[in-house]
Amino acid sequence: MSKILVVIGPSGVGKSTVFAPLRREGVVRLVPTWTTRKPRRYEDPTDADHVFVDDTAFAEREREGFFLETVQLFGLDARYGLPREALEDDGRSIRVLMLRAMLLQRLPHYFRAHRVYQVEAPRARVEAHLRTRLEQDGDIGSRLTNFDEELHAGRRFAHRVIDNSDTLERVTVQLRAWLREDFAEDGLAS
């Protein structure tokens, strides 16, 4: 089985944004997590990092064994689940999981071969972005007080650190180079 790419970083650093061009081109394939939280105003439920379901549907899937793991993060009511489809390798694109750093210790149980890329952005920029979320959606998604702690925790696990303070074009060029280097033996990064 080929490697899987795990993308980590605190809420608001731009994990989805930096991988969007590569997703559109089919270079990477996001394995969405399932969640009971409501989509945010700016999230397109048909093309999001999550599959949004209510508590009943989530619990039913959980009973059926649909998920590898389920968690409740940050003391919020919302639950998140990693579907078994994450184990499925289509052989055409690099599978991507977007997780939080605190969940990485569970990863080797399911994926022996993986690379971890952490996305980072300046705290002031992230804070402004999260405050906009608060005004638009009524929540911040995760607490800014955990921002520095999560960055430091992620750096311990990360094979690569993506500086999302540069232009999206430059970040995409850097990502392509790293993916070619990190996934060449799998025949997936050209």
Image (cartoon, rainbow, N blue to C red):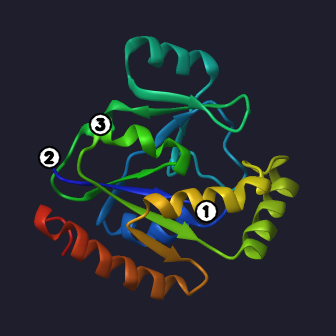
List the residue tagged with mark 1: 151
* Mark 3: few/some/many CA within 10 Å (<14, 14-19, 20+): few
Reading the chain from its start, which is encountered first: label 2 or label 1? 2
Eyeballing the image, is 66 above or below 145? above
Q: Quick check: 98 left or right of 139?
A: left
Q: Residue at x 38, y 46 (%)?
A: 31
Whether the residues at callouts 2 and 1 have beta carbons within 8 Å, the answer is: no
Whether the residues at callouts 1 and 3 have beta carbons within 8 Å, the answer is: no
Which image quadrant is residue 187 in?
bottom left
Q: Quick check: 11 left or right of 144?
A: left
Q: CA distance from mark 3 to mark 2?
A: 11 Å
Dot 1: element = helix
Reading the chain from its start, which is encountered first: label 3 or label 2? 2
Q: Is residue 42 shown to the viewer in this render?
A: yes
Q: Residue at x 70, y 38 (%)?
A: 74
Identified by mark 3, the residue type is: Tyr
The nearer-to-camera label among 1 and 3 is 1
Dot 3: element = helix
Task: Work out whether residue 50 or residue 122 is closer to the camera in this orientation and state it.
Answer: 122
Q: Residue at x 27, y 43 (%)?
A: 111
Reading the chain from its start, which is encountered first: label 1 or label 3? 3
* Mark 2: few/some/many CA within 10 Å (<14, 14-19, 20+): few
At which x and y percent is residue 102? 55, 45
At which x and y percent is residue 62? 46, 17
Eyeballing the image, is 172 above or below 156? below
Identified by mark 2, the residue type is: Met
Q: CA distance from mark 2 to mark 1?
A: 29 Å
List the residue tagged with mark 3: 110
Whether the residues at callouts 3 and 2 have beta carbons within 8 Å, the answer is: no
Task: Work out whether residue 83 or residue 122 is closer to the camera in this orientation and state it.
Answer: 122
List the residue tagged with mark 2: 1
Q: CA distance from mark 1 to mark 3?
A: 24 Å
